[in-house]
Amino acid sequence: MLEDRKFIESLLSLALRSPHAADYGRRQFLRSVGRLALGAGVLTNLSRVFGNPYALAAEPATLPEVTSIPERLKGKGVVRVSSYGGAFQEAQRKAYFEPFERLSGIKVIESEGPDVVKVKAMVDTKNVEWDVAEFDLADVINLKSKGDYWEEIDYSLVDTGNIDEAFTHKYALDMLPYGQVCAYRTDAFKGAKPDGWADFWDTNKFPGGRTMPAGSGGLVPDLESATMATGVPMEKVYPIDIDKAYASLAKIKPAVVKWWEAGAIPAQLLNDKEVTMGIAWNGRIAAIQAKGAPVEVSWRQGALRTDCWAVPKGAPNRENAMKFTAFITMPVPQARLSLLIPYGFVNNKAVDYLPADRLSVLPTAPEIKKQLYVYNSEWWAANRDKVISRWASWLLQ
Amino acid sequence: MTIAAESSAKFGAHRGRTQMGYLILLLPLLVYLGLFYAYPVAAMMFRSIHEPRWTADNFVQIFDTGVYLHVLWLTVRIGLIVTFASLLLGYPVAYVLARVDRAKSNLLIILVLVPFWTSILVRTYAWMVLLGRQGIINQLLLSFGIIDEPVRLLNTTFAVYVAMIHVLLPFMILPLYGVMRGIDENLLRAAQGLGAKPVNVFRQVVLPLSLPGVSAGCLLVFILALGFFITPALVGGPQDIMVAVLIQQQVDLFNWPLASALAVVLLAAALLIFAVFMRTLGVEQAFGRART
């Protein structure tokens, strides 16, 4: 049974979830370019064309230091952490792992490529290789509905005083909010600025190709924007009327050049003028903006999504995983990451450690957060199967 | 009589020992394949009809829901077009490789192999650079005044064909080259000496003798093309779905029995086409050497 699960897992599971998951393959690719030593020329050329994914943002001169941690977070031994590799995991190492190791005395052993399909296989075969890993919350909830696959988060360790309730869950703790938002070329519409999804759907006023997330590759189609495009206000998006949303999506379908399965793709399509407007993850847009691409984010009616830490059932170093999770949601580690990569923070106190110019590009900055709706992972966990099952036949209609 | 029987028995024993020796040599590979290939594939097939109990539901669903067969057909069609185009492009190259002298052919082989050794992602990204709206091809066409505004080359089925052919071409050229190299040049000279025109030499001697290479190359390219995944996802148009994408989707949905059933259908389609090749070209043609 072990072999066959592993086989299915390795042969078929190319599951790429969440922004960092979806970028994982691409990072692997660029790293293998480096490894193959194809020469700086190729890499430079690729970087020039696509924007260097290593430079997610200019690195700040100094990061705020974590000076001490509560006694309850200290321990010994190891914690095995799985995240999405590449520049992203490097940032996490700087922001979280290094200070955690130094202050807690617990050694962090890293690996790459978390995947709930693998968690299921690991727990089923009682061979849990990760103590804690990064996931999309909807995936955690979804797997929970299949059985007892997760450990409960130990909230006696977490100082939740400054963490919104929306970020704390029984089996997962959010750690990385990001925006799934509208981004557009500023040189495409003669100065007109799209504002909300009705404009995104209006190809007369805002001509040009579009790109949107696919319903494959571990992703779900953006039914929220499709719903809002029909005039439903942001607060009333959930529960989504799937039929209506698909019907609305069909209206923009002829303009969609590419349904993307990896977070790097919309950024690249916008950068290369393949499309004039797209739905993208804010961190990827910040990366091409830093390279000078004339692309702007329109935050209004965008989704505030989050990645979370979750602990697979039976993780050998469960205690350390809980301490690790609690540490990362502290204000300074959160601020450190937001300084390295323009993703948000779950601890509101992180604001104190972030300069104003940085806050202006973060999805959880107070001015931006209020324009976004909170992505309903519960709804998606319950309805993903239904939505996804229709995707391919809808697409080929 | 007795002597003959004795020697034949000895010979038989000897042959038996030799075969036993071969078997021992093959054993590590057989164990490896059995454990890591045959068993998982069998387990996957079993899962498609038995999880948690005997059922044909997964296959019924595949054949009932038009989309799976539709996507399977799209995948097979892309595979066939890519195979055919690779053959057209690869055959002359292999022919030249086999006919020029060693030194030149070694150099040319390296030219074939360099892309073969380059990561598939690198090559796919290279096509994105070439085919984009601001890519080299569009820039050239614009500067020559052939087009007034960039044409969409990237994110189309055309781009899928171009990138896949590029990736798979070496798999066509190498078997063709291997077979063509084995064609005895004396046969060509004999044909010429007997008054055959170059066209006839090719049609009546080279082409039939190279058929094993053609079938081996076509099989390799086609079967690899069926499983393609990354290239269509990166350069394909909005409707270019490959069956691998649907399989992954079902894995994601934890519907592993259905994913297994889809994989079984794909495997069956590949085997079916394999059988057709065998029928039309002959078993020994596909795997045997050129009969010179």
Image (cartoon, rainbow, N blue to C red):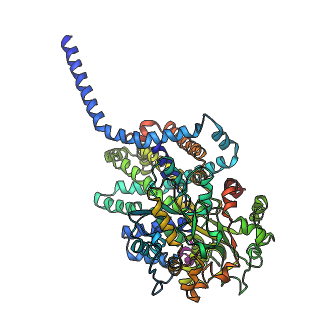
Q: Quadrant of residue B229?
A: bottom right
User: Going by the image, does B90 lie left or right of A254?
Assistant: left
Percent of width and height locating residue B195: 39, 46
Rendered image quadrant of residue A394: bottom right
In this view, the residue in front, A198 or A257, is A198
The single residue placed furthest to the bottom in the displayed view is A356
Residue A89, given in percent of the width and then of the height, sits at: 46, 70
Prevailing secondary structure of the magenta residues: helix
Magenta segment, which residues?
A: B131-141
Q: Is residue A325 above or below residue B193?
A: below
**Residue B283, relative to residue A335: is it above or below?**
above
Q: Is residue B135 magenta?
A: yes
Can residue B292 be seen here? The reply is: no
Q: Nearer the viewer, residue A98 or A119?
A: A98
Q: Compare residues A345 and B142 and report the one nearer the observer.
A: A345
Residue positioned 58% across, 40% down in the render? B48
The answer to whether A239 appears left or right of A8 in the picture is: right
Q: Vertically, is A182 above or below A396? A: below
**Residue A380, position as x, y percentages in the image:** 68, 60
In the image shown, does A231 or B267 lie closer to the viewer? A231
> Which residue shows up at 52% across the image and 54% down it?
A313
Q: Point out the residue furthest to the right here.
A: A231
Horizontally, residue B26 falls left or right of residue A314, namely left
User: Quadrant location of the C terminus of chain A?
Assistant: bottom right
Residue A160 in magenta? Answer: no
Name the residue at the left extreme.
B3
Q: Is residue A34 above or below residue A116?
A: below
How many numbered tags mark residues here? 0
Q: Is residue A222 left or right of residue B138?
A: right
Residue A190 coordinates in the image, percent (x, y):
71, 86
Q: Is residue A183 visible?
A: yes
